[in-house]
Image (cartoon, grey):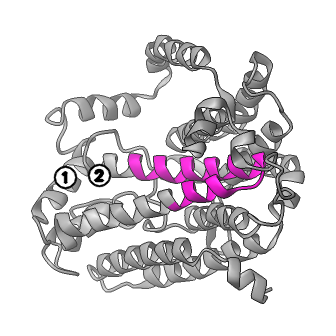
Amino acid sequence: MLTRKFLSQFDYFLFLAVVILALIGALGIYNASAEDGNYSLFARHLLWLGVGAIVCLLITTIDYHFLTDHAFLFYGLTTGLLLSILLFGKEINGSKSWFTLGGISFQPSEIAKVALILVLARYLSEISASYLQHKHLLALGGLTLCPMLLITLQGDLGTALMYLPILLGIVIVAGLRMRFLMAILIIALCVAPLGWYLLKDYQKERILVTLDPGRDPQGIGYQSRQSQIAIGSGGLFGKGLGQGLQSQLGFVPEVHTDFIFAILAEEIGFVGSICILMLYLLVLMRLIRIAGKARDRVGILLITGVTSLIFFHVAINVSMTLGLVPPIGIPLPLLSYGGSSTITTFAALGLALNVHQRRFVYSPASGDDSGSPRSYLPPSLSNYYNS
């Protein structure tokens, strides 16, 4: 597997940034476990990191064209899992989104994100037009709404909503006319008030508490309030590793998962938090660079899906800890505890490394510009790569 050619074309810079983020997350989980001296979560998280790294490297060795050729098979399998979980799944924290086998919990809605990226890229790779038509948008919407509906029925609206940024990012790069984008935004704004009546009472309350933090500080707003206190108390340089009172005394709920950024911010302060965000920025910039060197349309679209997935997860999670958006159970990629989310992130990054590995394999003949990335993009983005 690790041939000389593989090693010479491997993106060590991206992988190193990913490993550093993963180790920072592991350190945060270790410090959070010191509260009760139970380090079982830390040990299991290290296991998931190891499994995720193996999955990442394994996906890198498989030609991404083979994966996209079987995209609809992967999509069908994950959709079947989402259907079966409604019958046989286990309910955790009010959401019936988990399979439990031998003490190990598995969340298909996370893995389905990678399947969605593959199937959207596969579908769009067969469209030669510079801009998408109505029929294309309807097909893409159907492919995305199917898993979203099943996940919503499981009671996990937050995870379901994270499928939309993946779709939006991919269709914009694939060639979405501005009038279509404006029409979608207008329709979304018109439909949003109707969606209020479909929300459960606790979901409505979370939104209201976000808009008015003093509404229920000891109830629905407790998580966000304690998270903001933890971040603010970290000051400029933090209280020191393992010295965060909010986390050590158990004031911040879900500190291992959704609010891992809060405990890290309390311990390493504003400067350390900025360093974490800069590492994410480096990962995203590297992904954009890989997209710019991809040799075909499907490679560009795969990277777009991965970039959208990571960017919006980071943006929403950090906004949750700052109290800017309601807490909707979105993990922080590579840092939060969770086997399904960790493996999904590594699998997505494996797709990106895969495209990078094969950036020379499909190079056009000398003097032929047909394989250049700009030939696969709408004019607005092809001009970007020309500049």
Judge whether 349 appears above or below 16 on screen. Answer: above
Name the residue at the front extreme: 367
Quarter that holds the N terminus: bottom right
Q: Residue at x 61, y 17 (%)?
A: 180
Q: Do the residues labelled 2 and 1 touch (CB within 8 Å)?
A: yes
Left or right: where 3 falls relative to 173: right
Residue indicated by mark 2: 321
Q: Residue at x 52, y 62 (%)?
A: 286
Q: Identify the mark nearer the N-term, 2 or 1.
A: 1
Left or right: where 36 falls relative to 123: left
Q: Which residue is drawn at 39% across and 57% down?
A: 258
Give residue 123's position: percent from left, percent from top: 82, 38
Quarter that holds the C terminus: top right
Residue indicated by mark 1: 228
Give residue 254's position: percent from left, percent from top: 36, 60
Pointer 2 local density, CA inside 10 Å: few below 14, some 14–19, many at least 20: many
Question: In this orientation, which residue lies closer to the viewer: 28 or 85?
Answer: 28
Stretch of the chain drawn in magenta: 286-315
**Whether residue 266 is visible:** no
Magenta region includes residue 225: no
Looking at the rendered structure, the kind of residue marked 1 is: Gln
Indicate the secondary structure of the residue bearing disc 1.
helix
Magenta region includes residue 292: yes
Judge whether 7 appears above or below 347 on screen. Answer: below
Give residue 166's position: percent from left, percent from top: 60, 41
Please identify the quarter of the rendering in which residue 196 is found: top left
**Mark 2 → mark 1, Cα distance in angstroms:** 7 Å
